[in-house]
């Protein structure tokens, strides 16, 4: 049973979610909560190995179904080893990407039917859902430019811009469908402004 708080961070590449994760962690720590920061794909030893396969741009032959199944294999390990144990100890789990990314990238981007993703979600998560999802929204071109200044392109970052446009619109659609879970952050603003947006959102969850 879930007792803690499960918060996921989502968005296209370069939207700033990974950078702002430690800021969010600080807010909860200052409020006296124990915080676990983790990421997907990854978060466990096995998951990080799966991540290397998925992100390695040399792996050109990975099929869309293999990609999806590997995401959920890593997720299964992550839930059992890290997420559920932390939630049962009343901790706040901050996760850099989760299942919304599978719907956005493998669904919206690769074109896998969402009903097939739903089967894996039901199987692997057994009802586990984020309490809150922060969607860092930014136009795709700016995001990719920011990401390319940061590091060499991984297997996903080498895709065409239209792939990322589909991902962004899938995320926004999901946010519209589940307004009680999602909060959209305008990542085109300055870092100080984005931090203020985060503070305003989290106020609701800290009292
Ligand atoms: P990151 O760059 O945000 O760490 O994420 C790694 C990449 O993995 C990113 O391009 C998005 C992708 N991804 C998926 O395609 N599906 C998923 O389910 C997850 C969690 C990530």
Image (tube, grey):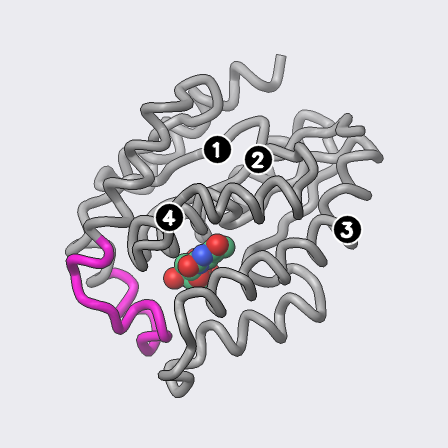
The numbered disc on residue 202 is none
Residue 131 in the image: above or below residue 87: above
Question: As rendered, which of 199 and 172 lies closer to the eye?
Answer: 172
Write down the region rendered in magenta: 146-164
Mark 3 lies on residue: 80
Does mark 3's beta carbon lie closer than 8 Å to ligand 1?
no
The numbered disc on residue 113 is 4
Q: Residue at x 37, y 54 (%)?
A: 112
Specify which label sits upstream in the sequence, 3 or 1.
3
Mark 1 lies on residue: 133
From mark 3 to mark 1, how far is it between C-alphas?
20 Å
Query: What percent of the width, then of the height, locates residue 195?
Result: 40, 34
Q: Nearer the viewer, mark 3 or mark 2?
A: 3
Mark 2 lies on residue: 7
Q: Nearer the viewer, mark 4 or mark 3?
A: 4
Question: As rendered, which of 156 and 24 lies closer to the eye?
Answer: 156
Disc 4 secondary structure class:
loop
Specify which label sits upstream in the sequence, 2 or 1.
2
Bin the neighbour count of mark 2 within 10 Å (Cα to Cα): few under 14, some 14-19, many 20 and up: many
Specify which label sits upstream in the sequence, 3 or 2.
2
């Amino acid at each position: 049973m879930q007792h803690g708080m499960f918060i996921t961070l989502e968005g296209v590449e370069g939207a700033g979610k990974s950078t702002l994760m430690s800021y969010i962690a600080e807010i909860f720590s200052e409020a006296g909560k124990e915080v676990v920061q983790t990421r997907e794909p990854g978060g466990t030893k096995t998951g990080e190995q799966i991540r290397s396969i998925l992100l390695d741009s040399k792996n050109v032959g990975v099929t869309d179904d293999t990609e999806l199944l590997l995401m959920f294999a890593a997720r299964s390990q992550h839930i059992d080893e890290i997420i559920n144990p932390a939630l049962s100890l009343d901790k706040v789990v901050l996760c850099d990407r989760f299942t919304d990314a599978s719907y956005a990238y493998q669904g919206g981007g690769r074109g896998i039917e969402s009903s097939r993703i739903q089967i894996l979600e039901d199987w692997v998560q057994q009802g586990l859902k984020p309490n809150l999802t922060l969607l860092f929204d930014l136009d795709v071109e700016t995001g990719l430019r920011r990401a390319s200044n940061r590091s060499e392109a991984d297997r996903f970052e080498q895709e065409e811009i239209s792939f990322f446009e589909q991902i962004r619109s899938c995320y926004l659609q999901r946010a519209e469908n589940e307004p009680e879970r999602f909060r959209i952050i305008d990542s085109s603003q300055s870092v100080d402004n984005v931090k203020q947006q985060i503070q305003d959102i989290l106020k609701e969850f800290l009292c």
